[in-house]
Image (cartoon, rainbow, N blue to C red):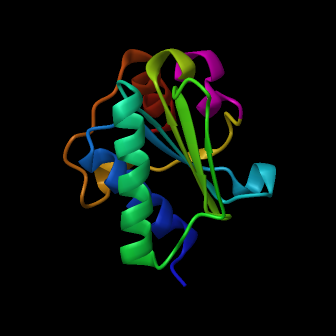
Amino acid sequence: MVESREAALEAARAADAKKATDIVVQEVGPHIGVTEYFVIVTAANNRQVDAIIDEVEEKLRETCGMKPSGRELSPDGSWSLLDYGSVVVHVFQPETREHYRLETLWNEARVLDLDAEEGFENLEYGDRIAKLLTREA
């Protein structure tokens, strides 16, 4: 079985390949106990939400041998979630992400430095997330 950290990074790489923005991988396990990592990303519209979710599912199945135990989608398509047990992937449209600010609920949770990891090419951050990441550095 693949380590949770590697699965979270693979999910983030899959989202990056589909041009997700504001990609954050947070190590929440020590703080919430029900999962190890949150992967939180932003998609521009419903179609991109779907494309990112599909890419994450395919990549984690191919590279990690993992299938989600749960998949949720908001009625308006502005948010979707894949639950892999040790990794939970959240894909938000901008307004929904700004409303929930999920990455701020556990301020003490460590955020992985994706610039230091291999396989990321399209990393793009808005001001709020860039400030969050700068705080972590």
In percent of width and height, residue 107 lies at 67, 33
Name the residue at the bottom extreme.
1
Q: Quadrant of the N terminus?
A: bottom right
Question: Which image quadrant for residue 98?
Answer: top right
In percent of width and height, residue 77 lies at 52, 29
Name the residue at the front extreme.
75
In percent of width and height, residue 62 lies at 37, 75
Q: Quadrant of the C terminus?
A: top left
Answer yes or no: is residue 45 visible: yes
Magenta segment? 97-105
Figure check: 49 above or below 101: below
* Residue drawn at x 33%, y 37% as measured from the top left: 20
Figure check: 108 above or below 56: above
Residue nearest the viewer, comparing 120 with 95: 95
Query: Would residue 126 appear left or right of 123 to someone viewing this image?
Result: right
Residue 16 inside the magenta-drawn segment: no
Residue 104 inside the magenta-drawn segment: yes
Residue nearest the viewer, comparing 61 with 27: 61
* Residue drawn at x 19%, y 47% as measured from the top left: 121
Residue nearest the viewer, comparing 92 with 113: 92
In percent of width and height, residue 37 lies at 60, 55
* Residue drawn at x 52%, y 26% as measured from the top left: 78
Give the overall secondary structure of the magenta segment.
Answer: helix
Question: Which image quadrant for residue 108?
Answer: top right
Answer yes or no: is residue 21 visible: no
